[in-house]
Amino acid sequence: MMNDPNEITFRKSVDLMFDRATATMDLPLGLAEQIRSCNSVYQVQFGVKLGDSYEVFTGWRAVHSEHILPVKGGIRYADFANQDEVEALAALMSYKCAIVMIPFGGSKGALKIDPRQYSEKDLEKITRRFAQELAKRDLIHPSLNVPAPDMGTGEREMGWISDTYQSLFPGQANGMGCVTGKPVHLGGINGRVEATGRGVQFGLREYFRHPDDIARARLDGSLEGKRIIVQGLGNVGYHAAKFLSEEDGAKITGIIERDGAISSADGLDVEAVKAHIATNHGVKGFPGADYTGNGPAMLEAECDILIPAAMEGVISLQNAAKIQAPLIAEAANGPVTYAADEILREKGTVIIPDAYLNAGGVTVSYFEWVKNLARIRFGYLERRNEERRGQMLVEALEKMLNTTVPQEIRDQLTTGSDELALVRSGLDDTMRNAYNNIRDIFNAREKVVDLRTAAFVCGIERIAKRYESMGI
């Protein structure tokens, strides 16, 4: 979060990044302002009886752009939530969906609450009441506005919201699609929980497929052996760190949490750190690692890749000049302020922007929404057919070559794609295509100064074309 009085607001920061992109484009007069404007923001206040007394809660749902429906965006629970933040996040959602070509407009919601201060029973009452307030205004609706998890919420809360909506509208055939990020047994999709972190992994993999891009960050080689510092081991940071270390051979040399930070030159065991946090409510005391109570200082430590994966504004005017990482992968929304972005670019730091790299969640949410509307799981019709085709191929190879196909290869060829495999394949394809569209803009247009500007140009152009074709 931004505490420097010299820093502008999160919403203004997003708008300035938008303006920097549109300055390189030739849009019809007034269209940029139309795209940038937040269409509507609703604030709701409602009381919930908890025990013997009532407590009043404040929540928001912002709808940034309805150039295509439904609009999409998470609901976060945080005691620091405010309308400015919600509007900024809704705007980012519009651009993000356009960048990865997911057919949603942008929206976002928040409830001003610290969920850790309430029992599960009370939190359920609060969530269901909030869902009722939003549903009355069509701010939860499978065809108009589809929420998802965000900071402080997860499968549990989405399950409560889904059940509340379907209880209010039992005749809605597509009611299950009113929200995504649900538990699989309540209409969710395999791979959604890990989706944003997996998208970070796929985005970094694609970046490291391009030698020119790697060299621009003063790095070389592959992800293997790269030293990574992760800020925030929540859902996104945990999965990104886990996959990058276990599957790509990267070393997680630093982890920053609320109570401080730990580091190890030999690399940290992400699963062990996660288990330690669950037991001890922080990283302090994790064996075999150096600890500091000054977590933000770890952002300035030497590493190859810095992954801010928690909240906005953690890299600001206060610390931008001290950041040593040559490559920043924005797994969170808005972790780098506009002013810090300018400083880092002048230093030559490469930033893979949030509007692209954070899109794994909404991509897999789209898959879940499509699944709910189709009322059939992915892989249901084709999996066994793929297995039979694979078996026929193995048998043909063995007959033609008069040999036995090794069991490992046989298993690979004769296993049909289940839902999780198809979700990961679709997410990988989405992240690859989107990055290449961004880098093509960056490399082809002299006025586009970095990957963030290129990403914004990519998204804005697609939204602009839709407005123009609508005659608006």
Image: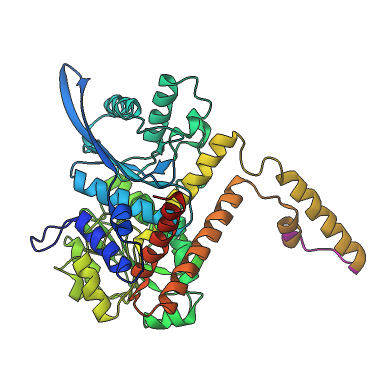
Considering the whole magenta stretch, tell me its main secondary structure: loop
Residue that protrudes farthest toward the top in the picture = 52
Taking the image as shown, residue 98 lies to the left or right of residue 231, namely: right
Stretch in magenta: 401-408
Residue 333 is situated, as x and y percent measured from the top left of the image, at: 31, 56
Residue depicted at 46% across the width and 60% down the height: 243
Residue depicted at 34% across the width and 68% down the height: 452
Residue 169 is situated, as x and y percent measured from the top left of the image, at: 44, 21
Number of labelled discs? 0
Instruction: Quadrant for residue 443, please give it.
Output: bottom left
Q: Looking at the image, can residue 254 be seen? A: yes
Q: Looking at the image, can residue 281 be seen? A: no
Decide whether residue 404 is among the magenta residues: yes
Decide whether residue 181 is among the magenta residues: no
Residue 356 is situated, as x and y percent measured from the top left of the image, at: 40, 61
Residue depicted at 71% across the width and 58% down the height: 412
